[in-house]
Image (cartoon, rainbow, N blue to C red):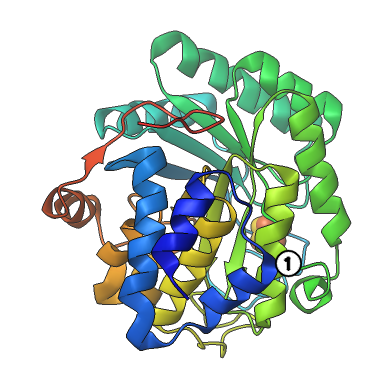
Amino acid sequence: MDWMNLAKNVIGGYDCLREEARAILHEDDAGLLGLINGAYAIRHHYYGKKVKLNMIINAKSGRCPENCAYCSQSIYADTDVQNYALVDQKTLVNGARQAKENHIGTYCIVTSGRKASNREIRAVASAVRQIKEEMSIKVCACLGLIDKDQADALKEAGVDRYNHNLNTSARYYDEVATTHHYEDRVQTIEAVKDAGISPCAGGICGMGETDDDILDMAFAVRTLDSDSIPVNFLRPIPGTKFADKDELTPNRCLKILSMFRFVNPKKEIRIAGGREYNLRSMQCLGLYIANSIFIDGYLTTGGQGESKDMQMIRDMGFEVEENAFETQSQDL
Ligand code: SF4
């Protein structure tokens, strides 16, 4: 397929079809650079050479009653993650100060658990109010399933974005978790949108799903109109149900990222967890497709470190887009 021609059509407003998206996943390795070139044309059209940086604080860790098969914080996993309740406001605000000093655009407050209690929502909202009074930084909350009233409270406090990933397709969901359902996740995203918070929803690849599952997910986030799409690549963690799933290659990851870019051309595509583990020496090629990454590691796994990430961005001639995301990306 002529990927540059498809890219030009997509930039012109054409909606990439499912069979075209499938062809991206099936592209030969020999055609990979041409595919990335097309994906980069789209990325460059909407985001130029800007890279959005995100930093996570694991604000409440471990002891989660849900059984997500990839997660080290589930009580069903045999891991030695730290267990602690929601950290205090001072810790949340200090994390935001550190993020600001490190030129991070979006500070992500993440808690373990099925859903946040109203007390936890109030505590996070209070911290976000202080953060917003003190500094200019975007805040994303990721507190599990929430309803409209809780989303309203977060919006009122100044939360800019809420992350709740679809994780996989509706069809494959029961292989990943059974203590909650795919539709629960969709309802949370709808509540977030109803409250006027920018939705962030993506998923995880490399969990044994088929191409059709990945395609379902890419088209589901397009239908949900998710502003930000984190694409995680499973880093199998010993002690979890998916500890032995290690099926991704760097080239496969690049094709998946390209597919998400063609299907969701204007959206913030983020290379999320598992970037270093799965893309390895090809990480910089991922940034020609995606326009957003996490810095400084993930919830329970480390990254390659801020200095190497910043070096990569500089080496590529890219620039950090500090303190900025738009709910709809704009032509540069
Ligand atoms: S992903 Fe979230 S909900 Fe699932 S087990 Fe881990 S902490 Fe719990």
In-image side of 66 versus 15 (left or right): right
174 left or right, relative to 96: right
Q: Residue at x 41, y 54 (%)?
A: 290
Amino acid under disc 1: Asp
- Mark 1 sits near ligand 1, with its Cβ under 8 Å away: no
Q: Residue at x 20, y 50 (%)?
A: 313
Left or right of residue 155, residue 249 in this image: left
Q: Is residue 293 above or below residue 323?
A: below
Q: Is residue 44 above or below residue 321?
A: below
Tell me if mark 1 has few (under 14), some (14-19) or many (20+) residues whose alpha carbon lies within 10 angstroms of its own.
Answer: some
- Residue at (64% x, 49% y) in the render: 201
Q: Is residue 91 above or below residue 116?
A: above
Can residue 286 be seen here? yes
Vertical arrangement, residue 203 with respect to residue 173, above or below: above
**Quarter of the image where ligand 1 sits:** bottom right
Q: Quadrant of residue 302?
A: bottom left
- Residue 71 in the image, given as x and y percentages of width and height: 62, 68
Quadrant showing the C terminus: top left
* Residue at numbered disc 1: 216
Residue 109 image-quadrant placement: top right
Question: Is there any visible trace of residue 293 in the rendered image?
Answer: no
Q: Residue furthest top?
A: 133
Q: Which residue occupies 33% across, 87% down?
A: 30
Q: Position of residue 99 (x, y in %)?
A: 34, 33
Camera-side residue: 46 or 73? 46
How many numbered circles does the render carry? 1
Label 1 element class: helix
Looking at the image, which is closer to me, 93 or 142? Answer: 142
Q: Position of residue 310 (x, y in %)?
A: 19, 49
